[in-house]
Structures are given as C-alpha cells and as structure tokens.
Amino acid sequence: MVRFALLGATALQATVVLGALTSQSLPARDEELRLVKTSEEDAGTWMTEEQKFEQLISKGIHFADITDTMSNLQTWTNAMANFYNRYYKGTYAATSAQWMFDTAKSAAKANSAITVKQFAHSYNQPSVIAAIPGTSGEVVVVSAHYDSIGSTTSGRAPGADDNASGVVVVLEALRVLAEAKFKPANTLEFHFYSGEEGGLQGSRGVMQSYSRSGVKVLAVMNQDMTGYSPNNVIAVYTDYVDAGLTSFLQKLVPVYTQLKLATDKCGYACSDHGSARDAGYPAAYVCDEGMADSSPYIHSANDAVSTLSFPHMLQHAKLTVGFLVEGSYF
Ligand code: BES
Ligand code: ZN
C-alpha cells in the first residue's frame, strides 16, 4: 500500500471540514470590535461593524471577518500563558495538567465517540490523549507539548510560542473535526505532552508504552512553536524525522496553507518527534520558523502572547486538519 500519498478526494473532504475553522456562530453585536482581514497575508485589523461597512463593504473591498476563530485560539493561549509557569515538576504542574484535560474534553464535546484520557508519568503532570476512533486498527497522531520552562525552574514562563501555540492549534483541529462529526478510517489521536522541557519525558512515556503494547502508529506530526514567524513561513524540519512522512508534509503546505514552506534542521532531537522516532514510529516536525529567526523569547518571562501572530497559527491549524483528514486514509 502507498503510504503518505496525497489524496484528492480527501482533500475535498478537508475543505469542507476546514470551512468550520472560519464559521462559528456567535452573533455579532454592533458595538463589538471584529477582526477583519483583506487577504491571506493581512495580519488583521480590529474594527466595528460600522467601520467594516464604511471602509470595506461600501468600497467593494473583499474581506473576511475572522474574529470568532481567532477568539478560540486566543482564549486558550491566554489561559495557558496565565499560568505563572507550567513546569512539569513545579507548583503549577497539576493545575496546568487539569486545565489541559478539561480543555481537551471541552474541545471534543460535540462528538461523544471521542475519548479523552490522562496518561500518568512519574511526575505530577500527566499527558493528555484525545482519540477519534477509526475502523482500521491503525493510528495517526498530531502532538504538542503543553509544559513550559523559564530562565529558572520556578521562574515566570508564559510559554506562549513554546508551546501554548502548538497546543491550541492541535485543540482547534480537534474541535473542528469533533464538530464535523468526522469519521476517520484510521484512529486520529491528539497528544498533549507534559515534561518536554525536562527532556521529552511525556512523549517518551507515551510512545514507549505504545511500542511495548504494539499500537500501530502510521504517522506522528509534532508541532512545537507555531505563532512567531518574521518570515511568514511554515518550517518543516528534516532531521530526527522520517524522510517519507516529512516530504509528504512538505507537499501539504501549499495545499492547505497560504504560507511559504521553509526547511531547517535542529541538529538534535529538539522536540517530541524524537520520542516517536526512538519508539520506531514515522514522525515529522513542523515549526513556525527556521532556527535562526525563531522566537528569541522562549524559555523566558518574555515568551508572551503579544509576540504571537494568531493568523499565522490559524495556518498551522489548517495544515493540521489537512494532515489528519489525509492521514485518516493512509
Ligand atoms: N521548542 C523547543 C525546541 C526548538 C527551539 C525548536 C527553537 C526550534 C527552534 C523545545 O521545547 C526545546 O526547548 N527543546 C530543548 C531540548 C529538549 C530535549 C529539552 C532544546 O531545544 O534545548
Ligand atoms: Zn522549549
């Protein structure tokens, strides 16, 4: 069987699902500010309904009101960054883990077939795994770590780019597929790992356990940092990954996103894809930038929400949904 082939039919299905990323049904009130963009490159401008009419509609300028999708990504990102830190052995390890568990359940609530479970580790911050059950007996995974670290283990660490940004992208993919009642052939899993900053520990625990119990994982797409991109790219990393899955992922970028593809290497197993690979599973790694231009604020008190681009993160969410819909038929 051909693995990692780009399927036109499923791309069409993905387009239907992707529509949900921009169509939530909150009623717009006149006095509210709405986030509006006039092109895919436009980062967005906040304006009132009146301003939308005066500046855009009356002039025949095409635009999209992206307020409601943005608010999902933003609400979750703010909640994560509001933990003083999410250090895996720190004071907020357990409370941040509870938030992760509750929020994954809430993102999945539209489809009662979806399971959400905690995966325990030796420290007090379980990983969280949501699954949309399939019929094939095989599994496709998207992942992101939710722990953070500051300049000291007890220091302030909002971890906005690293890696609230990856977590909310995966949550948003879970939400739209749940609301679409998407029925995959392969089981789709959404992994939210703890202990990454302590040496890929959460992902290692999960992946070693999967390998011991013979879980058939076809592909893992890891996202660590999705919101800081001065060059406006999606960066696919090419070391410590599976070459076939990585070249497949590179093909998806122009199909599901408006961003330029970049490639780079970490030079070491810099995130949770390393654990999947160590366990013998094909893994790929997607980031918001190449190493040189990636956020200079990570692992400090300055890795703040204000440094993120939510339109950029939405592009990662589209890629994630595309990957999952394609991956459901690998
Ligand atoms: N998100 C980083 C890795 C990263 C940094 C990727 C910059 C791309 C650009 C990750 O959370 C991290 O900090 N990893 C550690 C290694 C890990 C094994 C503890 C690192 O890079 O030092
Ligand atoms: Zn980090």
Image: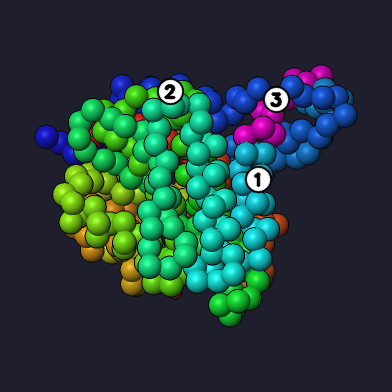
**Distance between the alpha carbons at the discs numbered 1 and 2:** 24 Å
Residue shown at 20% from the left, 47% from the top = 215
| Image x and y of residue 44, in percent | 70, 40
Residue shown at 16% from the left, 49% from the top = 214
Question: Among all residues in the image, which is located at the extreme left?
Answer: 1
Q: Relative to residue 79, is residue 103 drawn left or right?
A: left
> Mark 2 Cα within 10 Å, few/some/many (few <14, many 20+)?
some
Answer whether residue 295 is visible to the viewer in this image. Answer: no
| Image x and y of residue 185, in percent | 26, 28
**Distance between the alpha carbons at the discs numbered 1 and 3:** 15 Å
Element class at badge 2: loop
Element class at badge 1: helix
| Image x and y of residue 228, in percent | 58, 57
- Relative to the observer, which residue lies in front, 299 or 105? 105
| Image x and y of residue 50, in percent | 87, 25
What residue does disc 1 label?
Answer: 74
Answer whether residue 188 is visible to the viewer in this image. Answer: yes
Q: Which mark is residue 11?
A: none
Q: Which mark is residue 181?
A: 2
**Magenta span:** 57-69
Residue 161 against residue 89 in the figure, above or below: above
Q: Amino acid at mark 1?
A: Gln
Q: Relative to residue 183, is residue 56 drawn left or right?
A: right
Q: Are marks 1 and 2 in contact (CB under 8 Å)?
A: no
What residue does disc 3 label?
Answer: 26
> Mark 1 Cα within 10 Å, few/some/many (few <14, many 20+)?
some
Residue shown at 62% from the left, 39% from the top = 72
